[in-house]
Image (cartoon, grey):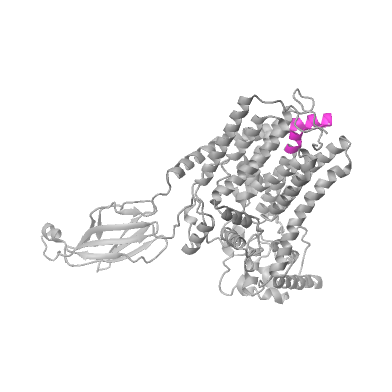
């Protein structure tokens, strides 16, 4: 059989070394940017950042996923496993994530080189995908930080196993590709979006093998091994959960008992539908009546005379969810309530609880006590007409995000709060990457000297109340000292002790309220970003308050940002307008090139590997987009940078492959004789 990649003309040695040198420089620059992009460590994010870190700590310590609770199997442990591996490596997490992305982009660039025979095209893909400004934007300890890398690596490995690997190594490559797909599947819950893209590559490979007259088994065996390796990872995960927690279960958010409970509750119709609230309060009140099991959760979901803390979540994003449990948050509120009632002591206990809940509601539906409709898609809440009407809006947001990266968002420093000990433990586990300092600890040391004088009574003194951005009552150190200068300047012997020395430690901002004995008061505030008092002289009723030096605020968290972070920030700021101009052109040309290559391939009944790869990538973009739009119109905003990261990378990859596919399309001057078969 022929190898893919027609036109593999040898490049001049000088050009080869120049491109290799350029690639090394690009890698070094990207790793520098990643290493000096401060991480936002949110130890208060119990359902995301801190959850991944805690499970990673358990995994690294040989305790599997840790003590079982409602969160242990709520999300796949794929990212936590990466965190553990990063911890063992001794490298900061920002660097290991950067190196992983470099490896994934390098793998897909290698496929581009083999498909096109052009190092220049491969390096162009590599550089453009590497420096998309959105890639480093999340800067959090979240699974999306590696998800786009995993998707590219699975695609590259599978393509290499199908089209390039020799007979000797093909089975090994497909084994690794299947394991990678299993890890990918255990990182996020919606991994199904990658299957259509892989199916496209499998179809091209199958058609090529048939054209080349190969036995069906030649195509089938590596794909069976790929599928078996993928299934083996999931089976191993469930088996380890059985040995550790007593139940053969994977991610229990996708388990049948939990999904059935959610689906049956969403199928109940009580009153008019509420957009973005599939199980509104009237429905829950009716369910409490027919389901004794669900009734045990009432004090948590609908507490008497109070509100559930989960109500605020949906209200942040969808006004119709205000005052109720919005979609995307109800399922978490349900799990939280079940845990508080003791139903998450083990996976078996959770299964028993949700199965009983489902059976009771289904029985009520069967008796006619409830009006129920069929829920055809598990975990997709029923859509109202208003939600369906959001589709054009979601598509516009999606298109805008893909074509125009916007502006550099800066650092979310206000999110870095929480338990100090937990913050330090997390830093240690992440191997001390560059990070934003904690914002809920004193970071402004204030030293003030001044005097206070009331002409009516030179001996009067003030009271002082101090607060800051996090605390209502800050304890300052206030010393009253001699003031011989005031005795002379005011010609008042009673003003002999009207000077003061004041020191305090504040969090960000600092507010001082000086109150005179007659109740008059004035506030002196130091803004979070200021290192000076607003003024030097103030009136407190009839008294005069003066400070000797208004420039007295010392920020103890100086050194941030340092010079490296400032350089990184400047580079990242510059990338946004650059890609804002580039992406519409690149994607537009890529789509036109793909249509041209499609037409030529259909007419000639032949194709190139570039065309096969472009087809797979465009399909992946579409399937990922469909999932995000469905989430956006059904639950919560999903046109959001972390969820879009795979699309950002794939748009560049798809466009480059489309351009080379048009160049090498059947019938063109530079066409390669490619048919879609695997290499020997």
Q: Position of residue 299 (x, y in %)?
A: 61, 74
Residue 275 drawn at (x, y percent):
66, 58
Q: Visible in this render: residue 440? A: yes
Residue 387 lies within the magenta run: no
Nearer the observer, 176 or 361: 176
In the rendered image, the residue lying farthest to the top is 669
Check the image and name the residue furthest to the front. 168
Q: Quadrant of residue 613?
A: top right
Q: Main secondary structure of the magenta part?
A: helix
Give the position of the N terminus as an image quadrant.
top right
Residue 328, quarter of picture? bottom right
What span is colored magenta in the figure?
A: 591-613
Residue plotted at (73% across, 75% down): 290
Tally of numbered discs: 0
- Specify whether residue 139 is in view: no
Q: Nearer the viewer, residue 44 or 127?
A: 127
Say which quarter of the image contains residue 51.
Answer: bottom right
The quarter of the rendered structure image containing the C terminus is top right
* Looking at the image, residue 175 lies above or below residue 542: above
Question: Residue 673 or 550: which is nearer the viewer?
Answer: 673
Is 5 situated above or below 402? above
Give percent across and percent down for residue 216: 88, 43
Where is 218 relative to 514, above or below? Answer: above
Residue 493: percent from left, percent from top: 11, 64
Q: Is residue 594 magenta?
A: yes
């Amino acid at each position: 059989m022929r190898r893919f990649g027609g036109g593999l003309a040898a490049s001049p040695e000088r050009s080869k070394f120049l491109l290799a040198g350029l690639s090394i420089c690009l890698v070094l620059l990207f790793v520098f940017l990643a290493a000096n992009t401060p991480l936002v460590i949110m130890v208060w994010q119990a359902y995301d950042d801190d959850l991944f870190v805690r499970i990673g700590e358990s995994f690294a310590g040989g305790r599997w996923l840790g003590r079982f609770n409602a969160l242990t199997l709520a999300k796949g442990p794929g990212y936590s496993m990466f965190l553990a591996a990063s911890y063992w490596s001794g490298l900061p997490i920002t660097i290991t994530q950067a190196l992983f992305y470099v490896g994934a982009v390098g793998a897909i660039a290698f496929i581009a080189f083999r498909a096109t025979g052009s190092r220049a095209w491969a390096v162009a893909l590599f550089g453009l995908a590497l420096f998309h400004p959105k890639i480093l934007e999340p800067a959090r300890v979240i699974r999306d930080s590696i998800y786009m890398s995993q998707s590219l690596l699975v695609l590259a490995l599978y393509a290499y196993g199908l089209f390039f690997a020799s007979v000797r190594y093909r089975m090994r490559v497909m084994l690794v590709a299947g394991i990678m797909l299993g890890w990918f599947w255990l990182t996020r819950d919606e991994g199904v979006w990658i299957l259509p893209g892989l199916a496209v590559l499998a179809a091209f490979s199958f058609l090529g093998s048939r054209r080349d007259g190969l036995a069906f088994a030649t195509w089938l065996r590596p794909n069976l091994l790929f599928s078996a390796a993928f299934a083996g990872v999931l089976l191993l995960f469930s088996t380890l959960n059985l040995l550790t927690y007593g139940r053969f279960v994977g991610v229990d958010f996708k388990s049948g008992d939990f999904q059935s409970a959610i689906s049956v509750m969403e199928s109940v119709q009580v009153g008019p539908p509420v957009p973005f609230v599939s199980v509104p309060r009237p429905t829950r009140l009716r369910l409490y009546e027919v389901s004794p099991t669900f009734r045990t959760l009432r004090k948590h979901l609908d507490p008497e005379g109070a509100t559930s803390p989960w109500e605020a979540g949906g209200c942040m994003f969808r006004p119709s969810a205000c005052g109720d449990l919005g979609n995307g948050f109800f399922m978490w509120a349900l799990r939280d309530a079940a845990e508080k009632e003791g139903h998450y002591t083990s996976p078996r206990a959770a299964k028993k609880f949700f199965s009983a809940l489902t059976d009771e509601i289904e029985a009520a539906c069967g008796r006619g006590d409830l009006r129920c409709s069929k829920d055809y898609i598990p975990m997709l809440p029923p859509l109202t007409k208003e939600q369906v009407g959001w589709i054009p809006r979601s598509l516009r947001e999606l298109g805008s995000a893909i074509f125009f990266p916007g502006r550099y968002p800066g650092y979310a420093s206000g999110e870095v709060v929480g338990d100090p000990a937990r913050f330090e433990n997390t830093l240690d586990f992440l191997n001390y990457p560059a990070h934003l300092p904690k914002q809920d600890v004193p970071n402004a040391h204030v030293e003030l000297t001044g005097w206070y004088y009331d002409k009516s009574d030179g001996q009067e003194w003030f009271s002082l109340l101090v607060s800051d951005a996090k605390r209502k009552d800050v304890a300052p150190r206030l010393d009253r000292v001699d003031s011989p200068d005031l005795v002379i300047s005011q010609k008042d012997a009673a003003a002999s002790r009207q000077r003061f020395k004041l020191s305090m430690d504040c969090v960000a901002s600092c507010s001082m309220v000086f109150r005179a004995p007659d109740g008059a008061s004035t506030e002196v505030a130091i803004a979070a970003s200021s290192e000076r008092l607003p003024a030097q002289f103030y009136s407190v009723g009839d008294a005069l308050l003066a400070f000797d030096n208004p420039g007295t605020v010392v920020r103890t968290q100086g050194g941030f940002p340092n010079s490296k972070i400032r350089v990184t920030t400047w580079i990242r700021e510059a990338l946004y307008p650059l890609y804002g101009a580039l992406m519409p052109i690149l994607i537009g040309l890529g789509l036109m090139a793909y249509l041209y290559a499609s037409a030529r391939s259909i007419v000639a009944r032949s194709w190139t590997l570039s065309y096969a790869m472009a087809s797979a990538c465009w399909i992946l973009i579409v399937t990922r987009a469909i999932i995000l739009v469905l989430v956006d119109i059904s639950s919560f905003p999903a046109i959001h940078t972390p969820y879009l990261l795979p699309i950002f990378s794939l748009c560049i990859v798809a466009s480059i492959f489309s351009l080379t596919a048009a160049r090498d399309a059947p019938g063109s001057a530079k066409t390669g004789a490619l048919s879609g078969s695997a290499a020997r």
